[in-house]
Image (tube, rainbow, N blue to C red):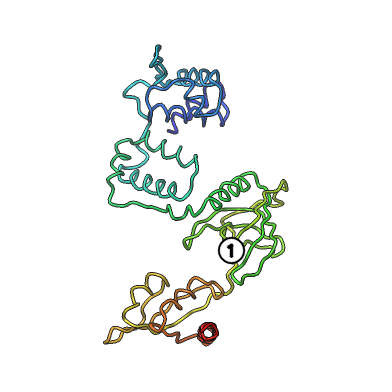
Amino acid sequence: MAVLQAKLAVCRGIRKMKIDRLMGIVVYLLNHGRTSAQKLAAEFEVSSRTIMRDLESLDQAGIPIQSFCGMEGGYQIMEGFVLEKQAAARYEYDWIVAALKGMASAYANKEIEQVLAKMNSLNIKSLNHAKESAVSIDFSVAGEDGKIKDELLRLEGAIKEKNVVRFLYTNSRDEEKEMEVEPVRLQYKWYSWYLIGYYEKYQDYCMFKLVRMERLEVTDIKNRRNHDLADINLKEDSGPIVEIKLYGKKAVKSKCREYLNGQVTREFENGDFEFCFSAPEHETYWYGVVLSFGNKVKIMKPQKVKERILKVCKEIQMLYEDSV
């Protein structure tokens, strides 16, 4: 691949944008075979005349382009031509393809699809083998609803163009606030999409959960600083982290491990157990999980969490007593 890029760059001093398109045409022809100039023009969003010039550039760079006339005419790369594929072993390509497919399942992005296509052209046998791989990654649940998908695309554009964004944000304490941040990165973690952005008021970086954002606006204001991702210390909008210890019945042991992401620290002969985990104090997810276990678990510490659980349970009891 690097050799081909070098050849293309030498040919007529081609600009980077054109090199990327030429590489894309080579990959597309390797994967799809004979294709008309009109189809290539539509795929790469240029004119048919531009495609013809690109094919000429590829021919001058040593890529064996063949042309065919008639109803089924078009252009293809001579059979037997392959791009260099010694950068990784076959099993390594399998892992790369599996990871790319996992990313594609979570995020609709044409660039990811193009990278997958390039991997296909580099090692077609490996990609076919990956279909039967013992490991598959599916993050399709991360796609969430149409609103989130639209916001992901808009935020990605804002990050690339370095435009400030505004939105109404509801934090974990149900407080609403108008935010104006410099967007830096989109990140998927804890089963949700987050925006990492620089918040001028705090002079720091914060994480914002996309599902809590409303009225997203991409402004024409440009970022005032350059952001080095390696130096970012994230300030999460979830409050302090609290260490929690609970006593649980045997029946909910596996569910505690699954939903609370902690560890069993002690087990008793009857199957009951002690369990420790850490969580953002003001987040509601873990709190709802603990309440859903009912009388199968009991908070041992800290005291403030015990008091919070007790208070809510009393309020729930009063609510139902009043409605009887």
Q: Residue at x 56, y 50 (%)?
A: 152
- Locate the N terminus and report the quarter of the image it occupies: top left
In the image, 250 versus 44, the foreground residue is: 250
Q: Is residue 142 left or right of residue 176?
A: left
In the image, 121 versus 247, the foreground residue is: 247
Q: Is residue 100 left or right of residue 220?
A: left
Is 313 drawn above or below residue 139 in the view shown? below
* Residue 175 percent location from the top left of the image: 65, 69
In the image, 26 versus 112, the foreground residue is: 112
Is 9 drawn above or below residue 152 in the view shown? above
Amino acid type indicated by mark 1: Leu
In the image, 174 versus 116, the foreground residue is: 174
Q: Residue at x 43, y 52 (%)?
A: 140
Q: Is residue 159 left or right of residue 1?
A: right
Callout 1 crowding tier (Cα within 10 Å): few <14, some 14–19, many ≥20: few
Callout 1: SS: strand
Q: Is residue 198 left or right of residue 50?
A: right
User: Where does label 1 land, which residue?
Assistant: 234
* Residue 98 percent location from the top left of the image: 36, 47
Q: Residue at x 61, y 48 (%)?
A: 159
Count of labels shown?
1
- Of all residues, the one furthest to the top in this rendering is 70
* Residue 197 percent location from the top left of the image: 62, 57
* Residue 196 percent location from the top left of the image: 59, 57
